Amino acid sequence: MSEVAPAPVPMPAKRRMAQLVMLAFAVLITMGAYANVGLAMDGAIPSGMLTYGLSLGGLMLAAYLVLAKFAPWADPLILPLVTLVNGLGLVMIFRLSETDSDLPSATLASPNTQLLWTLIGIVLFSLTLIFLRDHRALQRLTYTAGAAGLFLLVSPLIPFLGQEINGARIWIGVPGVFSLQPAEFAKLALVVFFAGYLVAKRDVLALAGRRLLFIDLPRARDLGPVLITWGVSLGILVLQKDLGSSLLLFGTFIAMLYIATQRISWVIIGILLFLCGAVLAGMVFSHVQLRGAVYLDPGNPELYNAIGGSEQLMQGLFAMASGGVLGTGLGQGHPELIPLAFSDFIFAATGEELGLTGLMAILMIYALIVQRGLRASLAARDPFTKLLSAGLSFLLAWQIFIIVGGVTNLIPLTGLVTPFMSQGGSALLANWILIALLVRMTDAARRPPPQAIQNEGMTQVFQR
Amino acid sequence: MNRTIKRAAVACLAMFALLMINVNILQGVRASSLSDDARNQRNFYERYAVQRGRITAGGKVILAQSKETKGDFKFLREYPDGRVYAHVTGFFSPESESAIERSENKLLDGSSADLLLQRGIDLFTGEPPRGANVDLTIHPAAQKAAYDALRESGKRGAVVALDPKTGGILAMVSLPTYDPAELSGTNKAEVFKRYDELAKDKSQPLLNRTIANTYPPGSTFKVVTAAAFLEDDSSRGADTTVPAPQVLDLPNTSADLPNYGGAACGSGQVTLRFALERSCNTPFGKIGIDLGYEAMREQLQKFGAGEPLAVPMSVVKSDFGPKEDAAAVAQASIGQRSNQMTPLQMAMIAAGIANDGVVMKPHLVNKITDSNGDTIDETDPEEFTEAVSKETADELTDMMVSVVANGTANRAQISGVQVAGKTGTAETAQGQQPHAWFISFAPADEPRIALAVMVESGAVRGGGEATGGGTAAPIAKAVMEAVLK
């Protein structure tokens, strides 16, 4: 066998130009979609399109410049992909607001507010990149992040600060001035906490325990963190009736626990605990029970007519069905017939007008964002970065799975925002920060390691 | 940790794969069954998204058209003179339609395969797709005359007129009627409530009495019995003598068949013409018994009864009744017992005699034109059945002219025009007034219209044969005049 020189490790390229072109492409697609909506619905290009185009394009350019300066090695795909889904979400909300209808899905859609939130989101993205030069600083804030996350979760329950809107007590703020959903930010803080905590404790959680049949079982006293998270998730469910967030938090924690410890038994324990929780919740809460029944037979007329029944789910399915493979075309369907078409059901509304083709593209974009994040996790050099980037990527994927799966009747509907598409400021801001963190970590992962100085006094090594 | 991160990455991909497969199943496989769901409001909007074709009569008069509006419902249906044409046009409600709106729906909404080429061209030229127009054989003046005359009688009833040469339906009126506009709005709750009211109304305004219900035809059926008698032996004619006892003893029963009011019919031996003029029961009862059930039923079938028929709305079957004893045949031969005819069938009998014994297929649709006015399809007159020989038809015409000139139907006389006709007074359930009938055609030598008029409870019990003619014949006269003038 002849000696083969080891292949040189390919240097990651910065690919800044490609990113700029893709970013411009994403903004152009969004603008084209705007024009399409206007032409289809009013026979004219929407009057505000120039403002929209300039503000979105301008801020994207600014974000690009910040990224090029402060995270030059960052993954070139993530920002354009996020821009595209965010842009399509804006177009759908704009399209809903243009509908000549009294239905809430048309009257409550507010594209201008959503554009403003998008702009603030991009600013936050840039600020995060500018001020968080090294994300490992977050590791030192592990317990602070945990405490902050818990506080944010319970803050809507605090008198005067918390607000009840539409029957859900998940808001804080001053009535009429502004309101935020702190749970959206709590998710980020808790993932930071999970990452820091698991890096510190993973050896214990991974090694201690005994083997039973084919599974390594952890020690009983190490079950503490899992049980606490489970309890917090159940708390969200009971106190805030927020099924989606509860499932999102618990699932993300279990996934991170598995990644950190490499122990499949944690996943099994997690699933068992989830099933216990689900059965308990089903027995205690009628609304959880109803969700289950709706999932199994959404077309049932009795469930359809029940309060909180399957009407919105069925209307979403009708919309997607009438969209078919190619969709009705933007502005030519009736997505306003779906309740909450601008938030929880924006995926179904998009499916009506862009069809199967459009939905496949959107799912592909989401999948790409998640895979780019996980790639950073693989390439990262320290366990905290690995866990944090994997955790944030999984959080995103899991959230999309829960809401899109719910809307398409793959799993029971629990209600979450569709990242970057649904109307709502808090989720948008939190998700832009999440993307900033991912971008920061891809920058760290792709940055070439400092080259060792080779030429130090010509050290000679002899072999005797 | 890379091993588990890779597994997590695979798990994420699997989640996206599941979502994608599920979306494919939804939008590719389950799409059609889901979008057909009645709870899907889109179907409702779609009904009004296309400019539906016009329904016209005689190429000019608009019976139904779609007008463009603002809002979710782009085109709304209008029915000028809706009540007059209701049973012809039908209605176009949020979830269903009726009559022509129903049977020609695919042409009207443009989804018919016949319009494929036009749709393809529209796609390229950017024209919005439009439905085809349906032109009917209805004669607007005759329809209006029938509607007005029948309404004046204040009774429920039916008038149906045919062009004996082509089978085109010139008038189709059924009273009571309804306003199709009330059932064609977009407010579902309102429309359904109104529909319920109409459907539950005891006077059955939604029922098209000309084709969707049968009635005992009474003495008008004697024309068919006479036809069977003449066809049985070619040597017989209008002046052949037939026995006409005061009372016909029905075999194997204690019942008898008397003439109307128990009156005598001439001298007991009369010509067929005289028997028809006076509408005597006994001669025709006897003819029925002599010819037998099969021959009578066969003659009726030769006039088209029992054949499946759609005009294009389907017509219920008329029937001579089940085979029973001779007494039943005698009664059925004078249009009683289980003998049940649609007014359209009686009009076809008149039209068959008018058209030298050939019954043309009745139809409503004259032609279909696309939105540019180009003809897509035109109905060719079609022979439906051969009822009697030309000679028999001539003899029958001759006798029916006598009925109008000298007999029970003098109120159908039109000055300067020879009218052929036959009256009828059909006994119905006990305690109810009999139905008044009249079938006729004119002019007798070159017929342009044949029709049947039926007025429910239009005659007076015990008022004599002439009462039926008295109510129904003037209505027929008005319709014939509208066509002939």
Image: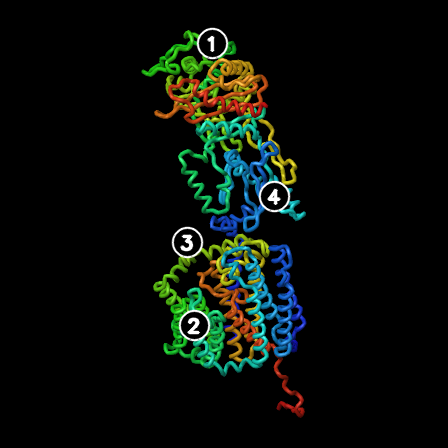
| Distance Cα–Cα, label 4 vs label 2 | 56 Å
Q: Which residue is labeled 4 in the image?
A: B130
Secondary structure type for disc 3: helix
Please state which amino acid type lies under the numbered disc 2: Gly
Q: In the rendered view, would you say A356 is above or below B296?
A: below
Q: Residues within 10 Å of mark 1 (few under 14, many from 20)?
A: some
Kind of residue indicated by mark 4: Arg
Q: Is residue B25 visible?
A: no
Rendering coords of residue A121 (x, y %)? 56, 72
Where on the picture, by quarter, is residue B139?
Answer: top right
Q: Residues within 10 Å of mark 2 (few under 14, many from 20)?
A: many
Instruction: Determine which residue is flagged by label 3.
Output: A305
Q: Amino acid at mark 3?
A: Asn
Chain identifier of the residue bearing label 4 in the image: B
Disc 4 element: loop
Of tags 2 and 3, the one toward the viewer is 2
The residue carrying mark 2 is A162
User: Which mark is first along the chain, 4 or 1?
Assistant: 4
Q: CA distance from mark 1 to mark 3?
A: 74 Å
The tag on residue B271 is 1
